[in-house]
Amino acid sequence: MIAAFVLFLREGFEASLIVSLLFAALRQLGMTHQARAVWIGMALAILVSLVGGAALYVTIQQYNGSTFQTVFETITYLIAVVLLTTMTFWMQKHSRSMKKELVAKASAASSGLALGLLAFTTVGREGLETAIFMLAFAFQTNALLLLSGAFLGLLASLLLCLLIYRLGYKLDFRVFFRVMGIVLLFFAAGLLGNAIQNMQALGWLTFGVVPLWNTGRLLSENSTLGDILHTFLGYAESPTVLQVTLYVLYLAIAGTFFARMTRKPSVTNAPVKSSAARA
């Protein structure tokens, strides 16, 4: 539930921000009469994402408990890790230039169909990512809790957008996406650990299989807290050497790159004039 809430809060806010910037671009370009095409493209993107995600979930549930489900879960985990990582870095890199990019794309779209496709692709990208993330977490938690977290996260993102665009609430977008980025990197590390666990259980990875410890007596993965930590941070009561190694290695590498991207540029001191120049 917590993972779904954070994901929908982040993805819902990003999608709302993109749509708001797109409408602002239409006003700037004097193309507000094309707003209907944007709404249609956005609605179609959301519908396709929902139908596609639901169809995949229903299909895979038919193989519940089978080897095929484990294989499908593993592939989904790995795809989600790649998407979470690239999405986090992409947003951090393009957050400052996003408005300029959308204005350029909107100005290049001369027809309602082109604007609708622009809205469909931009919002659809967020919807597709969210569907894959939800599918990955759906294998680890109760469907009702997952949907509850998703609904609350989406509601929170819409309320936040309302505060910003209607009531003049000031939000530091850089800080917001930085915090969300850190949380999502931990999500990705957890999914990577789960993928490694599945691949070792399937016999795809036959090295590093020795468990480092066993905390099952203190905190079982089947307990409420253990299940939350397993979904949220990739907690395993008996992690293997390879799981822990790749978990730590991923966080070290991705965290280092993310820290460099979010670091403020250093301000160089102005050159001091020489005494001869002052004279």
Image (spheres, rainbow, N blue to C red):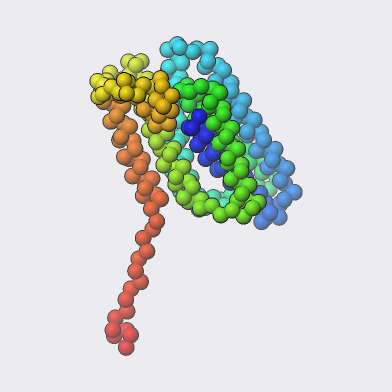
Q: Residue at x 65, y 51 (%)?
A: 166
In the foreground, 112 or 231? 231
Q: Is residue 119 above or below residue 204?
A: below
Left or right? Give the position of 37 relative to 264.
Answer: right
Front residue of 196 and 149: 149
Q: Is residue 269 above or below residue 185?
A: below
Residue at x 58% of width, y 21% of height: 55
Query: In the figure, 16 relative to 171: above or below?
Result: above
Q: In the current view of this chain or complex, which residue is farthest to the front? A: 218
Inspect this view and state whether residue 137 appears.
Answer: yes
Looking at the picture, tell me which residue is in the foreground, 175 or 128: 175
Image side of residue 249 versus residue 151, left or right: left
**x, y percent for residue 49:** 59, 30
Res. 90 visible in picture: no
Which percent across, then down, holds residue 265?
Answer: 38, 58
Look at the image and tell me in which quarter the C terminus lies. Answer: bottom left
Q: Is residue 233 shown left or right of residue 275?
A: right
Q: Is residue 4 above or below residue 158?
A: above
